Image: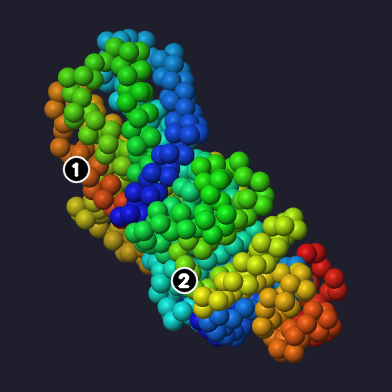
Amino acid sequence: MNPSTAPGARLTAGVFYGLVVAWAIAAWNAPIDAVQGVIQKILYIHPPLAFGAYLGFGCTAVFGALYLWKGDDRWDRWALSSAEVGILLCTLMLITGPIWAKGTWGRWWSWDMRLTITLLQYLVYLAYLLLRGFTEGSERGARFAAVYGIAGMALIPLNYFAISLAGGRSIHPQNLGNGSLGAGMGLPFLLGVLMVLAGFAYLVVRRFEVARLRDAEALRAVEASRGEGAWAS
Amino acid sequence: MLRARGLTRRFGPLVALRPLDLDVAAGETLAVLGPNGAGKSTLLRLIAGLARPSGGALSVGGAGRNRAAHRRQVGLIGHQTFLSPAMTVRENLLLAARLHGLGDAERRADRGLEALDLGDFRDRRASALSRGLAQRAAIARALVHDPALVLLDEPFTGLDPRAAERLRELLRELPGDGRSLLLVTHDLARAAELSERAIVLVRGHALPLDAAALASSEALRAAYPAAVRRLEAAA
Amino acid sequence: MNVFRAILWKDLVTEWRQRDRVVAMGVFSLLVVVVLYLAAPPGIGRDAQQHVPGLLWVAFTFASILGLNRAFALELENDALAALAMASADRGFIFLGKATASFVLLAAVQAFTSLAFGMAFGIDFWPVLGPFAAVCGLGALGLCSVGTLFSAMAVRTTYREVMLPLLMLPLMVPVLLGAVRATEGLLADGVLPWPPIQLLLVTDAVFGIIAYLGFEAVLDE
């Protein structure tokens, strides 16, 4: 069986690939920024990735809460899939960010507010995966991770509050709504956001299917081994 | 007293307990038999309220889904003593009573000490008890809140003959107060002697034995292997 | 309420009789003071007030992790944890009892460590003792509420002792930031600055509620 046969897989794949093409064309044709040069085009991917990463973290918490409430394994699989995809997008974000930073500010990293918060959130979700992996008993691991995911999401607004307290100085570009997008830049940016959202859905659906198949396979293996003669007490 | 319908317990993909239907009346003693790894301890811990069932319904003393009321009515005597090692026997009993929200903890603790003949050891730390004494303290702890359903997981293991005899007497007395007992044991003779009914578990599958099988220990010794074979074939 | 007191008493009495947590935490804090003093940048004497709050809270955090790890590790013996799980009283009170016991032990270590820090770096906490104790308390509250929840989780994982700091530290950033800023402001001006205290209160409330409610799910097998 193939994750590509999951319901919704073909649809999300189609939408995603279509948007990738549209985005690539729009980004290529967009005007080059007078001040920053070509490197500014990372704008068309970096903030959308950020959006996707935080969406992933939010979904992890929500699906985790649903799992705690309903007890249905499927919610836990959605939570795990969201977390993994969120981590992937966050990794890409933490790669594209420094590339842009080196091109404009001249250095790879700074302990700026937004960067620090994102890095912390990244560590929280890595810890989430570790918790799942190392808890004795997969059902217990799912439960613990759900609680941890909720705490992890509560952290996001608290961190913003915390770090704005620490001075709030930031060299990271603030709201894009201040018209910092020049003419001709709106479309590729919008397409970037839609593309990442579609990519998120596409990956989560497939990851869910992989999780479902793995559980089914593990069950089959256990059942098969039970039929074999004497077994250890 | 106990009603289970379609009770299951899974650990991820591993199914430890197949859908199980069970009824235990007040004052009844049910023996739970089966080879190691069959799911007997899992069943007991489920009934004790330590874990939530993966599926099905379980009701102890009519508590239904009220987990606190459920736990209030169950006492578990397991492989471990559940005693806090740094506290004395009496302190452990006091704590156990208070963990059930009982106001008369002192009276209950003293009563427990007396019933299990632990008076001389009331101020000894749990970590300094011999196995037999620790077992008695564990029993006192499990009974301090007067549970209607008492679960015993292989309680005769490792006991010297005198302690075993004491336990046997206790198990005969308990149902007299309308208490129900679930006894997991490998000792078929004791099972036949102490219980009215039995179920056999093999790899999560359960099969009840009829009353005739428990009439005597010979009957049980005959009926048990047959039941195990039947379950192994089905599993 | 009875349950809360019973658990609190149990943990404190156990600690009194075994004395392992407090001693470990205290000795560890002392080591941290020494190491930080040796590692501190030159001129620490003059600018001490600027750097000490951060170092102090680092010491508190590591000491708290030591203590919190033991909070549930000691329940593993004889499977005493199952005894707690089988309690019919409200599990929230069990959580509160455990967290408060850790809080009390941490508070004692905080007092001891502050004394050591004060002597090593020439800081006088006495004039601002009341507000300083309040900040220490608020910070300890955050550490112990989340720490108790995660300690209960960590104790069922494969890498027990390592798991707790991994889970806890990223979430403790708001608590630590608030506590450090508050301590800094207090030592500099003699008055508690409001924004960090506000942050501490909000964070303690949010995490406290999550920990209290989450504990129910964590205590099941």
Give yes or no for contact between labels 2 and 1 (Cβ–Cβ under 8 Å): no
In the rendered image, the vertical position of residue B114 relative to residue A64, given as above or below: above
What residue is shown with label 1? C198
Q: Residues within 10 Å of mark 2 (few under 14, many from 20)?
A: many
Q: Residue at x 62, y 78 (%)?
A: B29
- Confirm whether residue A150 shows in the render: no
Mark number for residue A202? none
Q: Chain of mark 2?
A: B
SS at badge 2:
loop
Q: Residue at x 44, y 68 (%)?
A: B72
The quarter of the rendered structure image containing the C terminus of chain C is bottom right
**Closer to us: B61 or A192:** B61
Query: Percent x, y for residue B38?
Result: 72, 72
In the rendered image, the vertical position of residue A14 relative to residue A37, given as above or below: below
Question: In whole angstroms, how far apart are the C-alphas of marks 2 and 1?
Answer: 45 Å
What residue is shown with label 2? B73
Query: Percent x, y for residue C39?
Result: 44, 16
Horizontal side of residue C148 vs B46, given as left or right: left
Looking at the rendered structure, the kind of residue marked 2 is Gln
In the rendered image, the vertical position of residue B66 relative to residue B91, given as above or below: below
Query: Percent x, y for residue A194?
Result: 38, 67
Question: Which quarter of the figure has residue A113?
Answer: top left
For the image, the number of numbered tags is 2
